[in-house]
Image (tube, grey):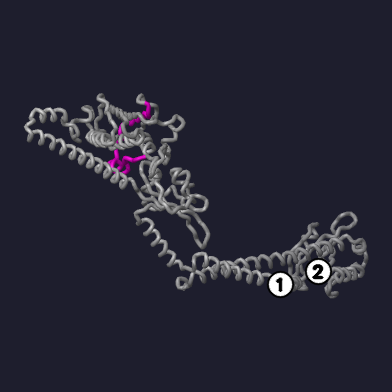
Amino acid sequence: MIRSMSLRSQLFFLQLLIVLIIVLVAGTVAVRMQEQQIRDAYQGRMVGVAQSIAQLPSVVDAFDDEDPSAVIQPIAELTTQATGVTYVVVTDDVGIRYSHPNPDMIGRMVSTDPSVPLSGETFIGTQTGTLGESWRVKVPIRGADGSVIGTASVGTLESTLAADLQEDLPVLLAWLVAAALVGTAGSIWISRLIWRRIYRLEPEEIAVLLETRDAMLHGIGEGVVAVDERGRLAVLNDEAKRLLDLGDEAIGSPAESVLEPALAQMFGAAGDADETVLVGERVLLARSSDAVVDGRRVGSVLVLRDRTELHQLLLDLDGARDVTQALRSQAHEFANKMHVISGLLELGRTEKAVDFISRSGHGGSVVSGDVSPGVSDPDTASLLMAKTTICAEKGISLIVDESSTFEPDGTTDPVTVLGNLIDNAVDAVGSNGTIHVELTSHAKGCIIAVSDDGPGIPESLRAQVFTSGFSTKESAGAASRGFGLALVQRVAERRAGSVTVDESVLGGAHVLVTLGPVPAPFDGAQRQGSHGVLTP
């Protein structure tokens, strides 16, 4: 039956049950307290009356008379009427009554045990006597010498106490009913409030929504990061955990303490365009938007897309286009030379044709010769050959130091570092510039140094150039710049190396990168997954 009830009804009846239990307990306690207060009030009155009777000189002196009851009975009746107690009974030292509401009982032995007051103590309790069950007080009466000569007993019937309590019950019950009604109204209001807060949904519907939300959130290929109003991480889907290298323990932590500063700053700065952010060694596209519920901002949501592999493919495509253009230019130049040689041969100018061939040489071939005999790493050698051809087309001299020695280390880290440094230098020197590359590998890692004759990097900016998104260039597409040196530094830090920027002997910038040994065991997925050559 409970399962068939709506959540709103369940909340109402549950709260109503709680209210009724509380009211019932509170009412029971209140009745008990009121009963005790009535009993305490009667007890205080009876103790005062009994002690007054026991200390009254006329009562004490009457014990020496031949008929003590003649004096004591009128006093007991007057006291009973004046104080509102049920009876005042005075006895001698053996328990013979000198006073009683029923005069026929005078001169007879009391029906209850008088030993306590006769021993000099005060008795307070409920006993059943000739008048019925009563709440009574018994005190000793002492003579002039201090000895106990009798007792004074004052009591009130239990029925009288019950009648007084019943007089107070209507008011008390009225308050309890009012409290129950207020509690019921509060239960109705709270159940409606909670019902509206959960968008009038039943638990089964909420469960379905949560399951659907989790399936969608963790099934999409984009990273989703959400923070609450306090800037603490509230949601991390599986893709976001992978891109940011975070776990479930990050949820609940301040965003600025677990995310890259550039990424954490995007929360609260909603925009319509994607921004390129470097996170670790990954290039991500990030877009921030406000999370709004019922017109109220409750947090921010960041959507992340991995651009690393796409960026690498675009760079590879640009490199292929540059090489293709270089080959096309060389083919055109070669065709022109062949036309000249053909013409000289047709004219019979054989000697001139031979001389022209000698002067032309074999230059221009992309694959002609080695970049440097000591560079045995095929990835690095291929990169240097491609960059040399591209630089030649731009009028830039790319010189690899003849003493360079470079062996494969099993990763693409050197290609990442060298490619970014050469691209930086190409942008810096412009046409007719010179770039010098020196490579050294050894058992503990490798050293990569790139110098140019460009304008260099001012000393005041040498620390800032390693900040993600910072660039000294002002050109189109600047939004995608500022990641090359930042990535180089992060690769160096991961390899327990360093990056320094200084002034080169050519007059421009000199960047020295040291890479430590490859950590063992090396994760092959890392080798292919996140390292890319970036254009700053």
Name the residue located 60 percent from the left edge and 70 percent from the top edge.
184
- Residue 381: quarter of image: top left
Say which residue label 1 marks. 169
Amino acid of disc 1: Leu
Quadrant showing the C terminus: top left
Name the residue located 40 percent from the left edge and 45 percent from the top edge.
479
Instruction: Give whichever of discs 1 and 2 has the lower sequence position.
Output: 2
Is residue 509 in the magenta section? Answer: yes
In the rendered image, the vertical position of residue 296 relative to residue 426, given as above or below: below
Which of these two is toward me, 207 or 460? 460
Which of these two is toward me, 398 or 113? 398
Q: Position of residue 288 (x, y in %)?
A: 44, 52
Please tell me whether mark 1 or mark 2 is closer to you in this view.
Answer: 1
In the rendered image, the vertical position of residue 497 relative to residue 534, given as above or below: above
Name the residue located 38 percent from the left edge and 49 percent from the top edge.
285
In the rendered image, the vertical position of residue 497 relative to residue 104, given as above or below: above
How far is mark 1 from mark 2, CA to CA?
A: 39 Å
Left or right for 313, reference 354: right
Amino acid of disc 2: Met
Q: Position of residue 114 (x, y in %)?
A: 78, 63
- Residue 280: quarter of image: top left
- Disc 1 residue crowd, few under 14, some 14–19, many 20+, Cα 10 Å: some
Q: Is residue 137 visible?
A: yes
Is residue 28 in the magenta section? Answer: no
Magenta stretch in the rendered image: 507-536
Say which residue label 2 marks. 109
Q: Position of residue 43 (x, y in %)?
A: 78, 63
SS assignment at label 1: helix
- Disc 2 residue crowd, few under 14, some 14–19, many 20+, Cα 10 Å: some
